[in-house]
Image (cartoon, grey):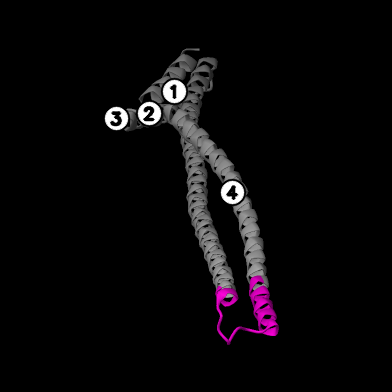
Amino acid sequence: MKHSLKTGFVFFILYCVSGSIWGRSAVDSVIHQRNETYLDYKHFIESMEARTWINMVNLTTKAKAVVEIDNDIINYYLFKELEKNKKYSGQIEKLNMEIAMLKKESEVRKMVLEEKRFLLNVLFIIIGTISILFLIILILFIDRQVRYRSVKVELERAYSGKEDYPTENDKQQEVMELNMKTGRLNSEISTLKSEIIGLKKANMDKEEELQKEISSRKQVEEEIRELIKQIKSYGKS
């Protein structure tokens, strides 16, 4: 019983001083004590002349003391190994969380670049739409000027008393040419209107994609914040 208390106390001392600056000297002291106990046991065996009951009890006690000290030393090193493994496991878990956070940050950067690229495309679409509208206005202005000039020419010819007054065929030919020009202008206007409708649809699709990207980005940012909270809480623990 005394030896059990003694060896238990030895293990308790080893456990308490293992993390201090005296830990190494304490372990050396226990090992030295074990060697002395073993030498005492060995010397007792060699010097024992008769196997009396008292000698056998003493021999058993000394052998038990050696075994218990050995068990304490083995338990100490097992405990140290378990603590080391636990520490490494915690570090690995923390590194895995940091890696996951870096991956999320990389995804956010990629999403930001894609968002900037998308906004640039939208800007080009807006500029293209404005250019087409300006072109339509210019075509309408030219068409109006052509109509105005044709009407002006007709009026001048109607009120002029010159001999070179155009014939009915000439008038019809000019009217046909004006109608053809007007038809071409109307066709171009219709084409431009169709292009504008397509650009508007593409712009709406881009806006919808942008909303989806923004929602996905918010979700990733929320996951990163959760990872940061977990890492901070893990560091505190």
Q: Which residue is mark 2?
A: 18
| First in sequence: mark 1 vs mark 4 | 1
Q: Left or right: 57 with respect to 9?
A: right
Amino acid type, label 3: Ile
Q: Residues within 10 Å of mark 4 (few under 14, many from 20)?
A: some
The magenta stretch is 156-182
Q: Callout 1: 10 Å neighbours few (<14), some, many (20+)?
A: many
Front-most of residues 173 and 230: 173
**Rendered view: 84 above or below 206:** above
- Please state the horizontal and vertical placement of residue 92, each as a whole percent of the image: 49, 41
Which class describes the residues within 10 Å of circle 2: few (<14), some (14-19), or many (20+)? some
Q: Are marks 2 and 1 in contact (CB under 8 Å)?
A: no
Q: Quadrant of residue 169?
A: bottom right
- Separation of marks 1 and 4 at Cα, in angstroms: 70 Å
Q: Is residue 168 left or right of residue 38?
A: right
Q: Secondary structure at mark 1?
A: helix
Kind of residue sitting beneath label 4: Glu
Q: Which mark is residue 207?
A: 4
Q: Alpha-carbon distance for marks 2 and 1?
A: 10 Å
Q: Amino acid at mark 1?
A: Phe
Q: Which secondary structure is most common in the magenta stretch?
A: helix
Label at residue 21: 3
What distance separates the C-alpha of mark 3 from that of mark 1? Answer: 17 Å
User: In the image, is residue 135 above or below residue 106?
Assistant: below
Is residue 177 found inside the magenta-colored segment of the image?
A: yes
Q: Is residue 27 a member of the stretch shown in magenta?
A: no
Q: Give the residue displayed 54% in from the left and 62% down from the top.
A: 137
Quadrant where the C terminus lies? top left
Residue 74 x/y as whole percent: 49, 32
Find the residue positioned furthest to the front: 161
Q: Residue at 41% of width from left, 26% of height from top?
A: 37
At a point 49% along the width and 17% down the height, the residue shown is 4
